[in-house]
Image: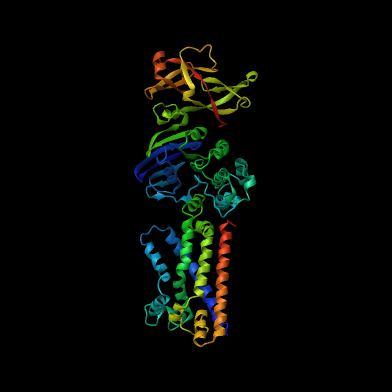
């Protein structure tokens, strides 16, 4: 845990009191509905806004008591919702704006212009004016500009929210690639769960200026008591590795912690790491190994918890493996079936998986 | 006809514009970005010359800067007895009189781009001063152009303030507008025509050039 955050104060209508720790690597998503204070937390981390509290990165205190380091002295990169490029500068000079003020002044260069240009596909844009870029291109330049200022912490404020669906799909692969390459921690603000599931490792759930829960994403996703489990698209994202192929049927075997999945398509050579997203509504439970079913995947598992969601539905958490020690998945089942099968926590079951989405290449 | 009034006028207008850009820029920045409750009062004082008859401003300046006025000591900095009826006095008068024409466009330009570019610069390690010169000023260039041209042109055409505090001393305070008045008074119509026509052409050219330049800058020419 190397990022230590605690801010409190009044924000317009409500009181904000947010405290969490985040790891010094990977993407930590601040997730919550609009107006829950997540952007304010990010702006406070950047020093763009001031609330009382404490902020430290790797023991380096940026704010505490009267200590308050101004924004331009914090080694951050900030990506705004709208790219906010400087319209009077070319793409190249935009990219190098922070670089000149860090590397140009003796800060060690970890991220080079060429690396960023390759990573974000900016080669053909360098000499253009930002005004002549598409929304997605502009945001990629914004990300590149932040990275080139050699940040020790990257702050991203809904970088995709202002983009249309098409531009979003265009830029997400770049962000995913970034995730694999980047060694600095990222705080990523979003209200889009799909985006968070594709990118984040760690999750901080916010609601009305408070932290509802914080922890590794898989743990939080598999907690049926949290509000994210109540969303229609609730599910888990699990790390998976390509373990083999069934070429005759065009299927790939993925190994999860505690089980295997057969999924359509060629997902690369053995050992390739993927992220598999399994929606709660795509998992059904059976007491006996299913026979005569077209569903390919039926994984032995054990029920570890269950929560009644409403009149109709139950949300069950199952842990893969006969002993129930593997990865956890959510299963949304009707109360009627739950009662009819006499299911309860601790019981062995078969988790039938109807669909898997592969969200990310390599971790 | 003597060239002296023309040269003197150009000198006055150029000097006034330079001073106004130096003094007016920080003032415009403060007016655009400060949260002080009394800033609009300051803005109103700056804008007063828009409404006041120039003679009123000239009258108060004369009182203020004359040998017995509270600002009379200023003249001793130049070794003069009084600011009244000197070129320096004229510069001070013109600076005050033309100030709103320079400060207002620059303030508007500073306000137009909002906080975001400044925040972005700060997250990229630019200090406030660095940000001012590398982001704020270039983004406000249109306002600077408008302010400089308006300030210059307005000073060229000034009459009332000049007459009140400058008088009509050839080579010292006898500027174009006063010279034209003089020619008319003494029925030298040809000379009056020449100067008046010259002013007309000049003003037309200035405004046309400015509008065309603004259009070009507005298109994002770098």
A10 vs A145, left or right, is left
Q: Quadrant of residue A270?
A: top right
**Number of numbered markers:** 0
Looking at the image, which residue sits at the far bottom? B186
Query: Which residue is pictured at 54% across the width and 64% down the height?
Result: B145
Considering the image in quadrants, where does the C terminus of chain B appear?
A: bottom right
Residue A133: where, in percent of width, then height? Answer: 59, 47
Residue B184: where, in percent of width, then height? Answer: 51, 84
Considering the image in quadrants, where does the N terminus of chain B appear?
A: bottom right
Q: Quadrant of residue A273?
A: top right
Residue A327: where, in percent of width, then height? Answer: 48, 23
Q: Is residue B84 above or below residue A268?
A: below
Instruction: State the residue in front, A301 or A333.
Output: A333
Q: Is residue A158 above or below residue B139?
A: above
**Residue A110 seen by the camera:** no
Instruction: State the residue in front, A71 or B222.
Output: B222
């Amino acid at each position: 845990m190397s990022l230590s955050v605690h801010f409190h104060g009044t924000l317009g209508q409500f009181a904000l009191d947010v405290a969490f720790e985040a790891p010094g690597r990977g993407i930590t998503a601040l997730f919550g509905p609009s107006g829950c204070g997540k952007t304010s937390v990010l702006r406070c981390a950047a020093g763009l806004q001031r609330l009382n509290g404490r902020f430290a990165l790797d023991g380096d205190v940026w704010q505490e008591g009267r200590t308050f380091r101004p924004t331009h002295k914090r080694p951050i990169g900030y990506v705004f919702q709208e790219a906010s490029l400087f319209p009077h500068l070319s793409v190249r000079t935009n990219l190098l704006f922070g670089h000149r003020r860090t590397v140009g002044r003796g800060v060690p260069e970890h991220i080079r212009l060429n690396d960023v240009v390759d990573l974000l596909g900016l080669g053909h844009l360098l000499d253009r004016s930002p005004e002549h870029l598409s929304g997605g291109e502009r945001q990629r330049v914004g990300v590149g500009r932040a990275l080139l200022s050699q940040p020790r912490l990257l702050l991203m404020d809904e970088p995709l929210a202002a983009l249309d669906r098409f531009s979003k799909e265009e830029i997400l692969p770049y962000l995913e690639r970034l995730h694999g390459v980047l060694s600095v921690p990222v705080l990523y603000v979003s209200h889009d769960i799909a985006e968070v599931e594709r990118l984040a490792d760690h999750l901080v759930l916010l609601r009305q200026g408070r932290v509802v829960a914080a922890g590794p994403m898989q743990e939080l996703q598999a907690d049926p008591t949290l509000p994210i489990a109540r969303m229609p698209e609730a599910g888990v994202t699990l790390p998976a590795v390509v373990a083999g192929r069934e070429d005759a049927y065009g299927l790939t075997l993925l190994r999860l912690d505690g089980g295997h999945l057969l999924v359509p398509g060629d997902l690369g050579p053995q050992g390739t790491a993927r992220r598999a997203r399994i929606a709660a509504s795509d998992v059904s439970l059976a007491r006996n190994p299913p026979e005569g079913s077209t569903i390919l995947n039926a994984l032995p598992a054990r029920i570890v918890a269950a929560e009644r969601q409403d009149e109709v539905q139950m949300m069950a958490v199952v842990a893969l493996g006969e002993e129930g020690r593997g990865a956890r998945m959510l299963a949304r089942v009707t109360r009627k079936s739950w009662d009819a099968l006499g299911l309860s926590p601790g019981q062995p079951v078969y988790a039938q998986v109807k669909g898997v989405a592969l969200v990310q290449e390599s971790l | 006809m003597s060239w002296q009034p023309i040269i003197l006028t150009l000198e006055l207008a150029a000097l006034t514009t330079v001073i106004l850009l130096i003094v007016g820029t920080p003032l415009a920045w403060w007016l655009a970005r400060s949260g002080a409750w009394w800033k609009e009062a300051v803005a109103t004082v700056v804008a007063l010359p828009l409404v006041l008859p120039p003679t009123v401003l000239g009258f108060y300046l004369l009182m203020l800067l004359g040998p017995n006025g509270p600002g009379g000591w200023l003249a001793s900095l130049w070794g003069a007895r009084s600011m009244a009826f000197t070129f320096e006095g004229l510069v001070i008068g013109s600076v005050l009189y033309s100030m709103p024409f320079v400060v207002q466009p620059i303030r508007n330009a500073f306000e137009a781009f909002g906080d975001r570019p400044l925040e972005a610069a700060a997250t990229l390690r630019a200090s406030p001063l660095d940000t001012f010169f590398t982001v704020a000023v270039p983004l406000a260039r249109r306002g600077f152009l408008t302010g400089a041209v308006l300030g210059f042109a307005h000073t060229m055409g000034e009459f009332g303030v000049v007459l009140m505090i400058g008088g009509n001393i050839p080579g010292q305070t006898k500027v174009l507008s006063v010279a034209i008045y003089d020619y008319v008074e003494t029925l030298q119509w040809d000379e009056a025509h020449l100067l008046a026509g010259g002013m007309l052409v000049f003003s037309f050219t200035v405004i046309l050039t400015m509008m065309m330049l603004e259009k070009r800058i507005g298109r994002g020419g770098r």
